[in-house]
């Protein structure tokens, strides 16, 4: 075994962005069927959010939907003697802290401030690092009209950041391409954008006013007493947005995950005068330390099979195996590139 100290120019760092389908089957970034669990919906957590699956198996959890209201409207109060304290107010406060980081801040969609919102939060197992901006197409329907939403990352002049990372506006369109059927900026008429897209926490915050305003026949319902087939006892609003996402007329949700893979390339360069002898027992006598074969004294031949990387304390940190043994003698030099991904 021979050692050689690596120099600064032997290291090169590279970062590559890898994208994949967001949902259960990562080869297909789109899901078109949506299911809920009556056990979860009618349980204690159903007062706060609704889990959505791409098939009836509960192992296929894709995302959760919920509703937040600053004033606590839209869900039953914890205590009828205390106004404004309910599951919807708790959800509002949770996302205000997560996204805005200020209990006095308000959610703004475009230039419109709103006291309530719907949330589509992607399950943590579905995305690696973030959602790939410009890959989203979310179809919402009220049974008679359909709106296709995407983010404006492809046309935004600059990237806005808050406590949750990058922030983009949700606009009418698909796969990052703006649709001007509503307005030239893709916003809702008089109601701001359709919501916020937060790729770094895989969350979509939807603007109820914009959605209600731009559905031709009455929106997807802002009345907290409105429910569809599945009733959530104290907060029916998550069920309203689920009904809009899962409507039978062309229901579809498409998006990709994104992950940055950092690779450290290490170039190991055995020069002509290096690594030509071996301490292997087949090469050198273990008792005398002499080369066993006289022909190997002036014209040795070795075969490099492994590259080990050590620190200054002689501790082995990484091992790289060559695909096949590399022949080495005084007439040959080699370049071995070791790739470390992390």
Image (cartoon, rainbow, N blue to C red):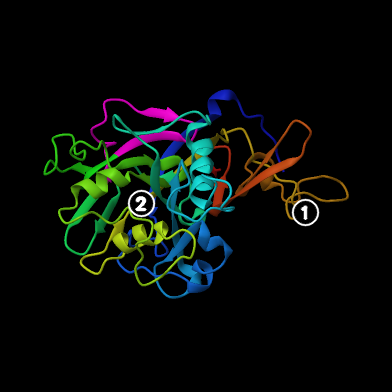
- Give the left or right position of residue 102, taking residue 154 as reference: right
> Where residue 132 sits in the image (x, y, percent)?
36, 44
Residue 186 falls in image quadrant? top left
> Where residue 116 sits in the image (x, y, percent)?
39, 43
Vertical side of 247 occupied by 298: above or below: above
Q: Secondary structure at mark 2?
A: strand
- Give the left or right position of residue 7, taking residue 26 as reference: right
Vertical side of 91 occupied by 140: above or below: below
- Give the left or right position of residue 298, taking residue 159 as reference: right
Q: Which residues are magenta?
A: 149-169
Magenta includes 130? no
> Where residue 24 sits in the image (x, y, percent)?
42, 64
User: Which label is found at residue 256?
Assistant: 2
Vertical side of 171 occupied by 313: above or below: above
User: Nearest the camera: 105 or 82?
Assistant: 82
Contact? badges 2 and 1 (CB < 8 Å): no
Label 2 environment density (alpha carbons within 10 Å; few <14, some 14–19, many ≥20): many
Residue annotated with mark 1: 281
Among numbered discs 2 and 1, the one appearing first in the sequence? 2
Q: Residue at x 48, y 73 (%)?
A: 38
Label 1 environment density (alpha carbons within 10 Å; few <14, some 14–19, many ≥20): few
């Amino acid at each position: 075994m021979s050692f050689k100290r690596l120099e600064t120019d032997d290291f090169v760092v590279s970062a590559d962005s890898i994208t994949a389908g967001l949902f259960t089957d990562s080869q297909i970034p789109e899901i078109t069927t949506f299911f809920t669990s009556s056990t979860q919906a009618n349980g204690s957590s159903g007062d706060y959010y609704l889990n959505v699956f791409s098939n009836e198996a509960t192992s296929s959890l894709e995302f959760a939907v919920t509703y937040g209201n600053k004033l606590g409207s839209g869900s039953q109060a914890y205590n009828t003697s205390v106004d404004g304290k309910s599951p919807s107010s708790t959800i509002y406060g949770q996302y205000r802290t997560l996204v805005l980081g200020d209990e006095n801040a308000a959610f703004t969609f475009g230039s419109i401030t709103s006291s309530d919102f719907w949330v589509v939060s992607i399950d943590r197992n579905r995305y690696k690092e973030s959602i790939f901006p410009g890959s989203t197409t979310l179809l919402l329907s009220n049974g008679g009209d359909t709106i296709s939403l995407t983010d404006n990352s492809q046309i935004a002049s600059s990237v806005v950041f808050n406590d949750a990372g990058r922030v983009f506006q949700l606009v009418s369109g698909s796969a990052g391409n703006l649709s001007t059927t509503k307005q030239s900026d893709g916003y809702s008429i008089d109601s701001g954008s359709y919501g916020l897209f937060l790729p770094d926490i895989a969350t979509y915050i939807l603007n109820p006013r914009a959605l209600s305003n731009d559905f031709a026949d009455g929106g997807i319902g802002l009345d907290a007493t409105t429910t569809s087939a599945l009733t959530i006892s104290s907060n029916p609003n998550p069920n309203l947005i689920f009904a809009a996402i899962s409507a039978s007329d062309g229901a579809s949700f498409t998006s990709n995950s994104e992950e940055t893979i950092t690779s450290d390339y290490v170039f190991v360069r055995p020069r002509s005068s290096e690594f030509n002898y071996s301490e292997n027992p087949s090469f050198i006598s273990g008792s005398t330390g002499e080369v066993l074969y006289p022909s190997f004294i002036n014209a040795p031949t070795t075969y490099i099979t492994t590259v080990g990387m050590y620190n200054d304390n002689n501790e082995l940190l990484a091992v790289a195996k060559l695909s096949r043994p590399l022949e080495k003698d005084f007439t040959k030099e080699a370049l071995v590139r070791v790739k470390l991904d992390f």
